[in-house]
Amino acid sequence: MSTECDLVVLGLGPGGEALATGAARAGLRVVAVDKHLVGGECPYYGCIPSKMMVRAADLLAEASRVDGVAGETSVTASWAPVARRIAEEATTHWDDQVAVDRLADAGATVLHGTGRLAGPGVVEVTAPDGTVTTFRAARGVVLNPGTRPARLPIEGLADTPYWTNREVVQVTDLPGSLTVIGGGPIGAEITQVMARFGVRVTLLEAGPRILGPLEPEASSVVADALVADGVRVMAGVEISSVSHADGTFTVTLGDGQVVHSDRLLVAAGRTPNLDDLGLETVGLDPSARSLEVDERLRAGDGLWAIGDVTGHGAFTHVSMYQSAIALRDVLGEDGAPAAYHAVPHVTFTDPEAGGVGLTEQQARDRGLSVRVGTTPLEQSSRGWLHGPGGTGVIKVVEDAERGVLVGASVVGPAGGEILGHLALAVHAEVPVATLRTMIYAYPTFHRAIESALDDLG
């Protein structure tokens, strides 16, 4: 079968869904395709369910901080309400009908199936029953294929029933012990959650420290927090092999050490879903790690790409940002082009760890005249008043020649919210001299930004 339309959107993660909705509401004949769940990784296996887990674990931690501050307390942890909330409130038991209906109500044709480019403006969609329909899009095609958990080339790993982020958010019973491979945001968050629910956790990271993209000062604070929660944090390790027998995982390290656990979570890396998208039919490389796009998210004539596969940050907020720009271009509307000098990111550990723009090292690597300022959050008025759990750091990175911040990092209670102030400063290139004339409310956590600016000299 062959069908004419205006626009085909391949991949309905947050950005793809938003773009398809906007295009349909603008009157275009939109065909929206996803082979799994409409909404993508974020609402079903990522941001949303994991933050429900984080919220529950943080409540347990806060309860433990009552002693010495507000009296005494005793809490019995239970995973049952967490699993129920994820299944019923966050994911509707991993059913996307609500999202499908929302998109259909906007006027789009929603298809579950495998979409593949078959030439410029041409997409073949294979339905679950094997039926193939060819769509010819007069306006073009938007690619938002997302990523999947990477398959690590570790001896024996593929033959074991290990978890990825997709399995761990669906667990109804917790193991006694867990090994986590990968100390990035997913690994760090899930590690802390499990530890606070009484699971014995070992976190393995190949790099020299966990949360490697963060400033070293920020990474150190989070690592110390995990250790305080009882986690065995091992960085700079090489994993030689993995095996599973009699209900036990065995992870053998390069130095001969062996780690045993009831369960294994692999949270190291993502693979872009570009390998079977038919990119070769439009002159693009199917083996590429990312798609090159311009400031309007164009990957070619009548072809746009948004989301993780553009290489500008595997974050829902980046995909949503790009979707708005690409939609304007699809509709022939003007607007600001994409700019990535102030992309914020937050890891929802306790304390929260976030950053925006360049790290100190990245700024130096670009040849900038760099000045940095740091301040411990616990020495600020709010950090000291907060007491237990008030540890953190704020770091700002200045391009001294221009007198503007090019990066900043925050670790601390509500660190992601404090980061908003600094993200605005980096994005708008507000002069440091202007930031120093501001009035910072007392006693707030964000007031410590003033101290970090003073430390610039």
Image: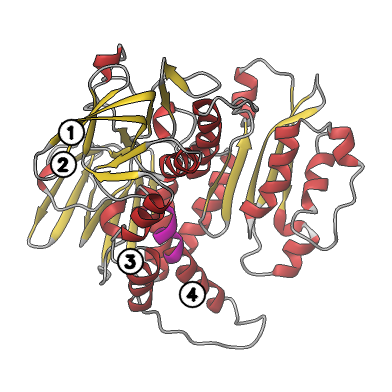
Residue at the disc numbered 1: 133
Residue at the location (32% across, 21% down)? 121
The residue tagged with tag 2: helix, strand or loop?
loop
Choose the circle earlier in sequence order: 3 or 2: 3
The residue nearer to you, when weighing 444 against 293, is: 293
Asked whether the beta carbons under mark 3 and mark 2 sit within 8 Å of each other, the answer is: no
Question: Toward which corner of the image does residue 367 lie, by quadrant?
Answer: top right
Q: Is residue 43 magenta?
A: no
Specify which label sits upstream in the sequence, 4 or 2: 4
The number of numbered badges drawn on the structure is 4
Mark 4 to mark 2 CA distance (whole Å)? 45 Å
Residue mark closest to the camera, 4 vs 3? 3
Q: Do callouts 2 and 1 mark residues in contact (Cβ within 8 Å)?
A: yes
Q: Which residues are magenta?
A: 46-52
Whether residue 33 is visible to the viewer of this picture, yes or no, is: yes
Of callouts 4 and 1, the N-terminal one: 4
Q: Amino acid at mark 4?
A: Leu
Separation of residues labelled 2 and 1 (CA atoms):
8 Å
Label 4 belongs to which residue?
Answer: 60
Q: Which residue is labeled 3 in the image?
A: 92
Residues at circles 3 and 1 in contact by the CB criterion of under 8 Å: no
Which residue is painted at 31% across and 52% down in the image?
165
- Using a 10 Å C-alpha cutoff, classify the residue at mark 4 as few (fewer than 14 neighbours), some (14 to 19) or many (20 or more): some
Tell me: residue 414, above or below residue 360. Answer: below
Going from N to C along the chain, the mark reached first, 2 or 1, is 2
Residue 343 on image: x %, y %? 59, 35
